[in-house]
């Protein structure tokens, strides 16, 4: 069970990384930022915030489950 919580935490971190475009080049990211709508940027920021928060929750649950075992 603990390993699945850790996998879910890393999956949430990957979602937030892709939403932030953390895995792309600087030139590409700057060009896409200028062409995005402000609503799209706000939606992506909400997605990043919630997925990062969910990742923290999964990691805390995994630590708690490992500690209880």
Image: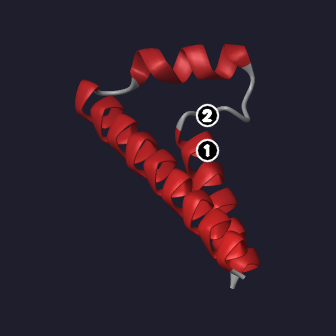
Residue 47 % position (x, y) = 39, 47
Quarter of the image where the C terminus is located: bottom right
The residue at the point 64 percent across, 68 percent down is 62
Q: Tell whether 22 sits left or right of 3.
A: left
Q: CA distance from mark 2 to mark 1?
A: 5 Å
Q: Residue at x 70, y 67 (%)?
A: 6
What label does residue 68 carry, if any? none
Which residue has dot 2 on it? 21
- At mark 2, the secondary structure is loop
Residue 18 percent across, percent down from the top left: 61, 44
- Helix, strand or loop status at disc 1: helix
Q: Which residue corresponds to mark 1?
A: 18
Where does residue 8 sit, x and y in percent of width and height? 62, 69
Image label count? 2
Quarter of the figure with the N terminus: bottom right
Q: In the image shown, does 63 or 13 lie closer to the viewer? A: 63
The residue drawn where x is 75% and y is 23% is 25
For the residue pair 29 and 45, the one nearer the viewer reads as 45
The x and y percentages for residue 13 are 62, 50
x 41%, y 21%: residue: 35
């Amino acid at each position: 069970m603990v390993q699945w919580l850790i996998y879910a935490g890393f999956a949430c971190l990957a979602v937030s990384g892709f939403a932030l475009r953390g895995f792309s080049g600087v030139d590409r990211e700057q060009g896409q930022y200028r062409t995005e709508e402000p609503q799209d940027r706000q939606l992506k920021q909400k997605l990043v915030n919630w997925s990062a928060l969910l990742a923290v929750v999964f990691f805390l649950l995994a630590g708690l489950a490992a500690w209880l075992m």
